[in-house]
Amino acid sequence: MIKSLSINNLLGINDLNVNDLNLIFKTASYFKEIINRPIKKVPTLRDITVANLFFENSTRTKLSFELAEKRLSSDIINFSSQYSSLNKGESLIDTVNNILAMKVDIVVLRHPNPGAAFFLSENINSIIINAGDGSHEHPTQALLDSFSLIEKLGKLKKKNIAIVGDILHSRVALSNIYILKKMGVNVRVCGPKTLIPRYIESLGVDISYDLIDTLKWCDAVNLLRVQNERMNMNFFPSNREYSKLYGLNKDVMNKIKNEIIILHPGPINRGVEISSEIADSDQAIILDQVENGVAIRMAVIYLLAKKINIKNAD
């Protein structure tokens, strides 16, 4: 049985093979059982220091990583660009090297620029975990989404999964497409034509502009919010118009009749891509995703930290 990852950094989903995915999911299942016990902490990473470097706003991802690190008993450094020397002109490399001089083993990086995690991995001697780089990738979100789907659907091979919403600006969409295709899933993206990237069919996905037809086709749907902060022009007339065509509400669910699983990576724009009634329904597994996020990130950090111990042993 394979007991270690084939990678030294988690930069994107495409770096992972199927054995890596299975190992992460199996390890996450173990950690999920632990974090539901009365004593939730394990001393696994007592000698490991993790730096959380967040150059973009985050709630769920930042808190999830921090809690995962605390559950593993690692030492933690939290960094926010808002109060850093970056405002004085310091470069990303200099900022990170200063932090690494404090003997940091693992860097969790959230950055607005695509490729920032890869850039760091090429320039510093530390394990890098990509916590989201611009509109490029968000690998741990894709891992926790798939893990959540496996819990509900079992094996995902040949299942029909839809991703609906702002595909163009979403790192979650890209990472989910990569991981679902690796697992043999039929993937369809759906949204306004202006929010569907050109040439996305080259990733092996189908395209639809019809929400009802897509929901009738799928076993599960991952709803994405409209990322207004990444838009420099109007991609659709208004939120009201978007909600009318692509919002998931009770009327839409009544039209499709079939039971589907509903995911959302958050933050939720209630009343736009999903109504409160549906977001809080039994079909939505949004809070399961949050819980699974801690277990998945524990698994990723633990498995990558094992690489440090192997390197030191050599």
Image (cartoon, grey):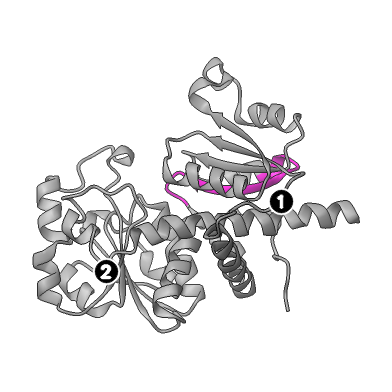
Height in image: 97 above or below 8?
A: above
Q: Residues within 10 Å of mark 2 (few under 14, many from 20)?
A: some
At 36% across and 57% down in the image, what residue appears?
Answer: 287
**Hey, what amino acid is under mark 2?**
Gln
Residue under the point 48% across and 53% down: 138
In front here: 237 or 299? 299
User: Is 131 on the left-hand or right-hand side of 73?
Assistant: left
Placement of the N terminus among the 4 image quadrants: bottom right
Q: Secondary structure at mark 1?
A: loop
* The image quarter in which residue 187 lies: bottom left
**CA–CA distance in space, label 1 to label 2:** 36 Å
Give the quarter of the image for residue 18. bottom right
Q: Which residues are magenta?
A: 121-136
Q: Which residue is mark 2?
A: 283
| Amino acid type, mark 1 | Pro
Residue that numbered label 1 is attached to: 43
Q: Earlier in the sequence, mark 1 or mark 2?
A: 1
